[in-house]
Amino acid sequence: MPIKPLDFLKQWPGISCFSPVLLLLVTAPVHAQSWAAVDALRNKLTSHGVRVIQRNCSTRGLQGAYHPKNDTLIVCRTHRNAAQVWNTLAHEATHRMQRCAGGSITLPSQHRMMSRVLRRETPQEWKSIRAYPRSQHLAELEARYTAKLPANDVMKLFDRYCGSTVRV
C-alpha cells in the first residue's frame, strides 16, 4: 500500500512557501519503481563520478552499501525485481547526497514526521534502523524515507545536494 500525502497539507494551503525539501518529503512515497527509473538514477550517479557496481554480498541481510572513501555504491545481487533494486539504489544514493551536503539533508522539524510515516507504512524498515549505532540513526532514517519517494523527487534531491553538473 503506498504512503499517502499528509492530510495537514490540505488544511494549510500556504505551506507551499516552505522549503522544496519539505514538500518533497511530504509527497506520497511509492513502493514500486521501473527499470527505467533504476537506470536513470544509476546514470546520474555514474555521471557524478560514483562507481556503481553489482556484486554477491556475503553478509546476511545486506542489500547494498555506499563507500564514501572511494565513492563506490554497491547493489547486492539479492534483489528479485526493479522495486527492490530501486529501494537499495535510492537508499545508497541518499548516503551520497548526505556526503555532498556534509551531513543531514533534512530539517530537524521533519524527522518526527518521517519516523512516523516509516513506522506506519514500512514497520520492518523503521525497526531495522535500530541495528545501527545511534549516531547513524538519522542518516538511515533519511535514506529509508528518501528511497520511498517517487523517482523524480529522488533525482531532484540528488541535483539539489550534489549538483546537476556532470563530470566528464
Image (tube, grey):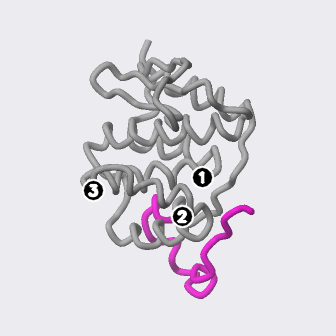
> What residue does disc 1 label?
148
Task: Pick the residue in front: 46 or 139.
Answer: 139
Q: SS class of the residue under badge 1?
A: loop
Q: Nearer the viewer, mark 3 or mark 2?
A: 3
Quadrant of the frame with the N terminus: bottom right
Would you place residue 156 above or below residue 149 in this image?
above
Q: Which residue is mark 3?
A: 134
- Element type at mark 3: helix
In the displayed structure, would residue 61 be above or below residue 32?
A: above
Residue type, mark 2 in image:
Leu
Q: Nearer the viewer, mark 1 or mark 3?
A: 3
- What distance separates the C-alpha of mark 1 from that of mark 3? 22 Å
At x 51%, y 76%, the residue is: 15
| Three-letter amino acid code of the residue under disc 1 | Lys
Q: Indicate the position of residue 10 as horizontal and vertical percent values.
A: 63, 82
Which residue lies at the image location 36% right of the left edge and 52% below the top edge? 105
Q: Is residue 94 left or right of residue 5?
A: left
| Picture residue at 34% right of the left edge, 55% below the top | 137
**Residue 62: percent from left, percent from top:** 49, 35
Mark 3 touching mark 2, by CB under 8 A? no
Residue 111 in percent (x, y) is at 39, 67
What residue is shown at x 53% (from left), y 35% (from top)?
63
The reply to whether the C-beta atoms of the residues labelled 2 and 1 are less than 8 Å apart is yes
Magenta-highlighted residues: 1-23
Q: Which residue is mark 2?
A: 118
Q: Amino acid at mark 3?
A: Arg
Task: Answer few, some or many: residues within 10 Å of disc 3's Cα (few below 14, many 20 plus, some between 14 and 19).
Answer: few
